[in-house]
Image (cartoon, rainbow, N blue to C red):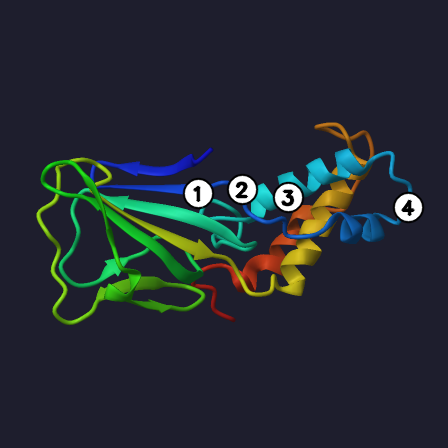
Amino acid sequence: MADPYLMHPAHLLVRVGVPADIVTLDEAKAHLEYIDNDRDAYIGALIDVATEMLDGPEGMVGKALGEQVWAYSLRYVPADKIAIPVVPVKALQSVVYFDEAGVEQQVNVNQFRLVANEDYAYLEPIDGFTWPALFDRADAVTFRFQLGMDVVPVGIKRAALMMIANWFENREAVADKTMLPVPFAVESLINRWRIGWMAA
């Protein structure tokens, strides 16, 4: 089921389904040096939590990491560039709109040019394309995109593994022993991949 991420009178952004995990079960178990299978479900749940904390526009990195699909709906469509509020975008999958009669119609994706890199993305309609009259509703036009990094950076994967190991060893919200601040190490690994990061 799609989970709303951002609602606004003029737009709606939702992730369709769940993102691919940042690390595999085998990678996590190798990092934990745990070879038995009796805790696979638990380790898998920790992988899901790490992915949720790091991945997506609200995650610590602020980007789509594993492969995933997002739908971006607009009530009003700008005539020129259409900024996409989640990155990195790999492909435009579909474009649908509701015509004046409220009937759903489809637009060929070749009517748009995708301009994108790791930190931004937007669509430009090709010369000669004009939008038809639209029905007045929050999702008058919906763009569906494929997102995610081609390869999740080693630093981000290492950060995820450190988070998983920390949770695996410490099952409570508080601890009765002194521990090194793992979150600081995680932040140092992911900082260079954050949107707008610049080296000092």
Classify 10 Å Cα crowding around label 4: few (below 14), some (14-19), many (20 and above): few
Choose top left, top right, bottom left or bottom right for residue 139: top left
For discs 2 and 3, the disc positioned in front in the rendered view: 2
Q: Which residue is nearer to you in this view: 109 or 142?
A: 109
Residue type for callout 1:
Arg
Circles 1 and 4, Cβ within 8 Å, touching? The answer is no
Q: Which dot marks residue 18?
A: 2
Q: Is residue 111 left or right of residue 156?
A: left
Q: Is residue 137 left or right of residue 176?
A: left
Label 3 or label 1, whichever comes before in sequence order: 1
For discs 4 and 3, the disc positioned in front in the rendered view: 4
Circles 3 and 1, Cβ within 8 Å, touching? The answer is no
The answer for how far apart the CA atoms under marks 1 and 2 are is 7 Å
Label 2 or label 3, whichever comes before in sequence order: 2
The answer for how far apart the CA atoms under marks 1 and 4 are is 34 Å
Residue tagged by mark 1? 15
Q: Is residue 35 above or below residue 189?
A: above
